[in-house]
Image (cartoon, coloured by chain):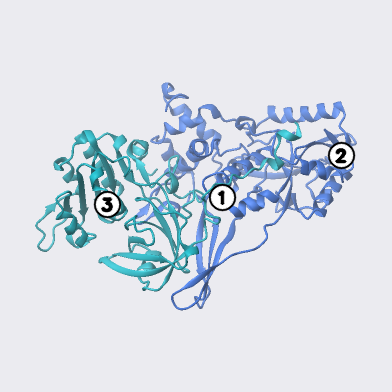
Chain colours: A cyan, B blue
Amino acid sequence: MSLDRVPVGGYAPQSVPGVPAEAMRPRLYEVSSVHQDTRDTFTLELHPRTDADRLDAPYAPGQFAMLYVFGVGEVPISMSGDPARSNVLVHTTREVGAVTRAMGALKPGATIGVRGPFGTAWPVDRAENHDVVLVAGGIGLAPLRPAIYHLLAHRARYKRIVILFGARTPEELLFEDQLSEWRSRLDLDVHVSVDRATGDWRGNVGFVTQLIPRAPFDPRTTVAMACGPEIMMTNAAAALAKRGVPAERMWLSMERNMKCAVGHCGHCQMGPYFVCHDGPVFRHDRIARLMSVPEV
Amino acid sequence: MHTIDLTGFSTLLGALADRGYQVKGPVVRDGAVVYDDVHDACDLPAGTIDEQEPGRYRLHATGDPALFDHTAGPTSWKPFLHPPSRRLFRARRTDGQTFEVQDDDAEPPRYAFVGVRPCDLSSIRILDRVLTEGPFVDRDYAARREGTFVVAVNCTRAGHTCFCASMGTGPEATEGFDLALTELVEGDTHVFTVEVGSERGQELMNDVPHRDATLAEADDARAGIEHARRHMGRELHVATVKDLLEANRDSSHWDDLAERCMACGNCTMACPTCFCTTVEDATDLEGATAERRQRWDSCFTSDFSYVHGGAVRPSTGARYRQWITHKLAGWVDQFGSPGCVGCGRCITWCPVGIDITAEVRALDAATPSPTRGGAA
């Protein structure tokens, strides 16, 4: 074996342009507001503490960040704000564990750690000149909201825009004021359904996927994006397919356990994919087979 | 190719120490060959062979002077490059609500690994790809790796759980080393042939008394390696295994495995390429400082796949399927090669003796022939 054929120790790390020097070290952001959306769901607005703390890249609709609460832990949470407002990060989450509970207890002025943005984006460019159908279940509306902001900011580029949103009960409807605002627009079809009607609810009752058969879109030229519990997305994909939307024009946002978000911890694997960087947004045909197998 | 004798080997260890390396090599501890500090040839496990079977590992004395007659032991080089536990950062409260993150400026250790078997050499190359050649670089790993001097040792004896020949990773080191030795013991002769793999290796040899290897020595080295190649204890049909596993995600074989597998995670700890980690956060008692640590994790725990509402893989069968399918199929898509190097550690160190090569064979036997080897 000749010397020039063999690199020293065989080791040649690749340097990737645009990658933060230390991907595991959080940037510091200040909580500027905490808004209680529903009983267990809240929205944080965050501003970088200094210019050096600002994330290196603007985020795209569908991406997420890792949010760190001092001494408690770190969790992946989707961006839920307007991607055009790049100086502020908005995250909406439910209190489901120690970290999100501690996060919900933060007050304006508190510091929070942020890493990101990570992951793949909703296909808002691919959707241009198409009907766009967004199907959201519960907190699944939050990761879709940046896409909605984008679609509305560039309304002329899209044909019909349909938002189908379902929650378990009327009390759990997310972004209610905004939903009302969207419903009042003439260039937007918004349909809301609850699994279980309570109080004086007079709207649709049933799973959000039951809205798909009657929704006003042309399947031949539709791009669909869905986010919610896995079973809801599976059912949504089936209902959309039944209308004639091909799997190559449906995108879903997957959820898996994540510790690092940079493809090193192994937790988020789904078949050959790392959900942190091959996802969370996947074209449906890429993952349909995997989604059909239990416990992948 | 050069030849050094036993004194030369000790000189080589000394020359590495003189250059500031922490020299790590095989030593016997608690009845097993593990990698730890070595200063002199006499620290190494002379005359020791290991008997390895599924779920069984025993050392035996041979009376032979050979230092490298053992094969892969319970530990690999992974702990040195990708530590079982390390701090990612420290943070300090600056007032009631705010904090700052403190950098860790600790210098990475500089290791010389002496006795890296070809399978383990491949496993290091695989970890390089996982941790430094994707979109993000694990800088701690990269720093440790960059400083590491590698003395490979070719295998002239294969263990009963070895299958590096199937995986194309051994028993001969072909690249990725600074020096590669082959040990030759015959009668009163005890020498090592030395192949130089880098300029750094060449430079070290300046301080190690050596001569040119004779043709007979080169032949003996080659014959020893061939002997190991022909005596592999296990084999795995690597050309078809990816398709086989991908076609069998729904197989009832995983339920059968769940009856035997204890989900203890030993295989993932012993594996030289299993890289998964989790993180732990802690504060001091006053809550004034916090730290975040990364530690090895295993896909066999129920926590591993936990999302709110429960684990994605609650059953043991699904966890074993995840492990073996990742190792032999998904890894190829992710990193361009299987994540298995055929070292056999997962077989030997499985408390119930589950054998990855036997599971692949069983799955193959249970798969209708039309899909065998060719299914998508």
Chain identifier of the residue bearing label 2 in the image = B
Quadrant housing the C terminus of chain B = top left
Front position among marks 3 and 2: 3
Residue B160 or residue B22, whichever sits in front: B22
Quick one: SS at disc 1?
A: loop
Both labels 3 and 2 in a single chain: no
Residue drawn at (17%, 60%) of the image? A170
Q: How many numbered tags mark residues here?
A: 3
Residue B122 visible, this angle: yes
Q: Position of residue A205 (x, y in %)?
A: 13, 52
Left of B348 or right of it: where is A291? left
Left of B312 or right of it: where is B93? right
What's the mark number on residue B4?
2
Quick one: SS at disc 2?
A: strand
In the rendered image, which residue does mark 1 sit on?
B137
Earlier sequence position, callout 1 versus callout 2: 2
Left of B124 or right of it: where is A203? left
Chain identifier of the residue bearing label 3 in the image = A
Left of A208 or right of it: where is B142? right
Front position among marks 3 and 1: 3
Q: Is residue A57 above or below residue A287?
A: below
- Structural crowding at the residue carrying mark 1, measured as other residues with C-alpha within 10 Å and reported as few (<14), some (14–19) or many (≥20): many
Which residue type carries mark 2? Answer: Ile
Residue drawn at (9%, 57%) of the image? A202
Residue B58 picture quarter:
top right
Q: CA distance from mark 1 to mark 2?
A: 38 Å
Which residue type carries mark 3? Answer: Ala
In the rendered image, which residue does mark 3 sit on?
A153
Residue A133 visible, this angle: no
Front position among marks 1 and 2: 1
Q: Is residue B298 above or below residue B325?
A: below
Quick one: SS at disc 3?
A: helix
